[in-house]
Amino acid sequence: AEFSGRCLDASSKVITCTLTWTFEGTVVTGSVVRHKFNKANNQVVNLVASDSSGLRISKDLLVKVTLKSAAINLAKKNTDFALDLSKPVDFDKVFIGTELPKSFVITNNGNSKLDISSVVIEGSFRTNLTALSIAAGESKEFDVWFVPTQSQDYPGALAISSNDKSQPKLIMPLFGKG
């Protein structure tokens, strides 16, 4: 974040002064300063203005800090609801030798770019989702196909690794019957 300040006299004329800023225990002097906050939420920034006559004024400023981060969200296509990842996506019964696709949307609900670095799918499933970047607020559609080769139950999973700090590895459980 960038902060700037100046000192004014009673008639609003700019006067020479020294500005000292305190951010999260770090002290910086200058009329224009930068600070990278380490945590979100409301932060108190202390500003002290002092002039050559010894006049010193201290003011606490409340600053709302929102850290930049990516936030991954998975949903079925044409829905606004996030998938419940505690339950597998059920492809139900599919004839052996055929395949059934299901469409999904991956959305970046964060305020910085989402980088998907790895996509791994397990079981008798395949996907067209690959490593990619998604801008803040944007979405990408992808499909998962169930391709059974025998008459049996098929558990599986789609694992997506990204730079989302709260869930760097998202696992979507999958299930189908051949």
Image (spheres, rainbow, N blue to C red):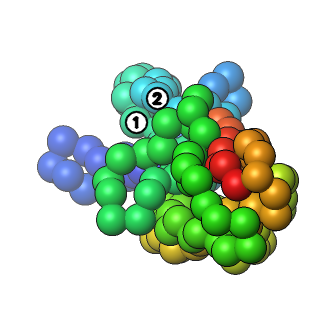
Image position, residue 41 (x, y; %): 46, 29
Badge 2 marks a residue whose secondary structure is strand
Label drawn at residue 64? 1
- 67 or 173: nearer the viewer: 173
- 111 or 74: nearer the viewer: 74
Q: Earlier in the sequence, mark 2 or mark 1?
A: 2
Q: Is residue 169 left or right of residue 42?
A: right
Q: Is residue 147 above or below residue 52?
A: below
Label drawn at residue 41? 2
Q: Residue at x 33, y 65 (%)?
A: 78
Q: Is residue 134 left or right of residue 167?
A: left
Q: Amino acid at mark 2?
A: Asn
Residue 130 in view here: yes
Q: Residue at x 77, y 46 (%)?
A: 152
Q: Amino acid at mark 1?
A: Lys
| Quadrant occupied by the C terminus | bottom right
Q: Is residue 4 above or below residue 101?
A: above
Residue extending furthest toward the left: 11
How much space separates mark 2 and mark 1, taking CA atoms? 6 Å
Question: Residue 29 occupies which quadrant of the picture?
Answer: top right
Image position, residue 50 (x, y; %): 48, 33
Badge 1 marks a residue whose secondary structure is strand
Callout 2–callout 1 Cβ contact below 8 Å:
yes
Image position, residue 60 (x, y; %): 40, 24
- 133 or 59: nearer the viewer: 133
Residue 50 in view here: no
Q: Is residue 92 left or right of residue 163?
A: left
Q: Residue at x 37, y 29 (%)?
A: 62
Q: Residue at x 32, y 57 (%)?
A: 79
